Image: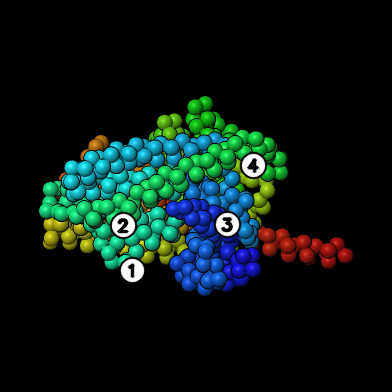
Amino acid sequence: MKPILEKLAEKIPVDCIYEFPYTFLGEEKQHLLIVIDSKCQVPAKTLEPMAELCLAETPLHSYTLIPYGELKTAIKNGTLYSTLACRKQHLKLSLGKKPLPHLTQIELESIRTKAREHFEKAAIKQRDFLEGMEFYRSKNNFEQALFMLHQATELTFRGIEKAVFKRDRPSHSLQEHLKLITRYIPELATLFDKEEPHYYRLLKLIDQSYTAVRYERQFEVEKEEIEQLVFKLIPVLDWCNDYYHTCMIELDAMIRQASVEPIIQATTINAPPTITLSLPDQLRNQLNEQQAKALTTICTNLIKKEALQQLVLIGLEASESTKVAIYQSDILSTPQTTHCYLLGISANSSTSKSHHIVHTDIRITVILCTSSRVSQALEKKNRFFIQTLTQGTPLYVNPDKALFNVSENDWITTLEKAKAVWNYRKYKADTFLTCAELAIHQRQDTHIAMFLVSQSMEQLCIGLIYTCLGYHVDQSTLPFLLQITKLISPQLADCFAFGGEDTKQAFKSLANSLHAVRYKKEAAPSDRELEIAMACYRRFQTIAKTCCETTFAQLQKRIEVAAINKESVETAKNDHAVQPSNVL
């Protein structure tokens, strides 16, 4: 067998292969579980012909192709079939470097508890329906007897599916259940083979019995038909019971073995690094004890969940005071509730998008970026990342990861890009707003008008954020964009904060307008909501324009200061070069 498996591994990307025995209707069977390498991008279905060709010399072995990730998830989720199949004694070939999950005694006991709950409940109903079948057969009521046999079979199949395979197919069709179980027990496909029309017709007949008897439709069953179905199905039901008990016996053995296995203590090498947050004095002075504790807890959980290598404080809106911007001075300010802004950098390529965390004591807006993106942005001299990493306050730095190499910003290029992005996004925002006004005045369509206003605001926010911060937003939902604009000026978000419930409802309709128009799942916004949204957006536009003009002036000033400094440095160099000749 080993040469055949090695040949198979040469033809398809195999991680490992398990071979395990089982009994079906008194016959010993062998099954191969072929695990596809995690890096393989080809669907398992596409690899089946090659696997079948390689295994043609082993007709006594059935096989299943399963991707590594799917098998790993199945074991983690407590699938009894996968847990029993992937034991060490069943391993025939191992080529992959990634191990499958090793379940603890507690996890195995949890699998046993759930399996018992699912199957034993089905077994009780199976016995009751089989007794009902015998009763109606004795009364020559074959239609009702067939219905009872159908229910006993369906419930048994569903019990096996849930207990052993951890699958739940809520269907009254036995064909559907046979199709599912055949994925794990291929021999079951021969029970009602399509190549045998007589038996396949019997399968359709028993499936019809459920709806026919339950809904009192015209339905007739001959005595010979139900006898043949009983002859076919009763041994299968008995096998289901035996198969379940065999699996439970093997699971009990695994639990006993797990209970005596030594507990491996994690070494200091493998232990996760200690997470130590350093809150700056400026931040501690603005927060009370509960807020500092909540911030520490949230940041610690965030670092663990996202595997962050660096967490930087960008800005803070302290309670009942003006915003304390750590890396950029505030332009316009109003009293705000406590709100922290953080940049999290992770080496994980699948880092989730930025999000907003609301706590009873503090609010946190987190901008999450991968380290590769940060490196690319720094190479392009992106202002947001340069300012954040040089002037922001580090709360956490992973000592095992190298720090980023931050160069000096090119203020001339920054100003040119900022103006170009602002003009382009503002043009798109104005175009959407003009279309919205046409939808209002010519078509009286509040649905489309609200949608166009939301698109206009989205474009304006993207342009505003890049112009003032240099940050390319990675998501365009209005609530998140509005949170980011608070880093520029709290007055921007305040445009939608006043007016009570009416303003809140107007902004909600504005934020949900894309979903509402695309899927038509919400009622059209009222004229009042559209009027409020338009008025708030007009105020937002005015403040955004002021912020951008101020930013342009600040950048121009930085260019002038940089030019003066450069000239001073060159003058000093020239003086230093001339000085030796004067001495001589």
Marks 2 and 1, the one that precedes in the sequence? 2
Q: Which residue is mark 1?
A: 195
| Three-letter residue code for mark 1 | Glu
Are there few (<14), some (14-19), or many (20+) residues within 10 Å of tag 4? few
Q: Nearer the viewer, mark 2 or mark 1?
A: 1
The answer to whether residue 156 shows anywhere in this view is yes
Q: Which residue is mark 3?
A: 18
The reply to whether dot 4 and dot 1 touch (C-beta < 8 Å) is no
The front one of 231 and 579 is 231
The reply to whether dot 4 and dot 3 touch (C-beta < 8 Å) is no
Marks 1 and 3, the one that precedes in the sequence? 3
Write the residue at 50% across / 32% down: 294
Q: Which residue is mark 2?
A: 175
Residue 93: x percent and y percent?
Answer: 63, 60
Marks 2 and 3, the one that precedes in the sequence? 3
Marks 4 and 3, the one that precedes in the sequence? 3
Marks 4 and 1, the one that precedes in the sequence? 1
Residue 386: x percent and y percent?
Answer: 57, 54
Mark 3 residue element: strand
In the rendered structure, the answer to whether residue 303 lies left or right of residue 180 reads right
| Three-letter residue code for mark 4 | Pro
| Three-letter residue code for mark 2 | Gln
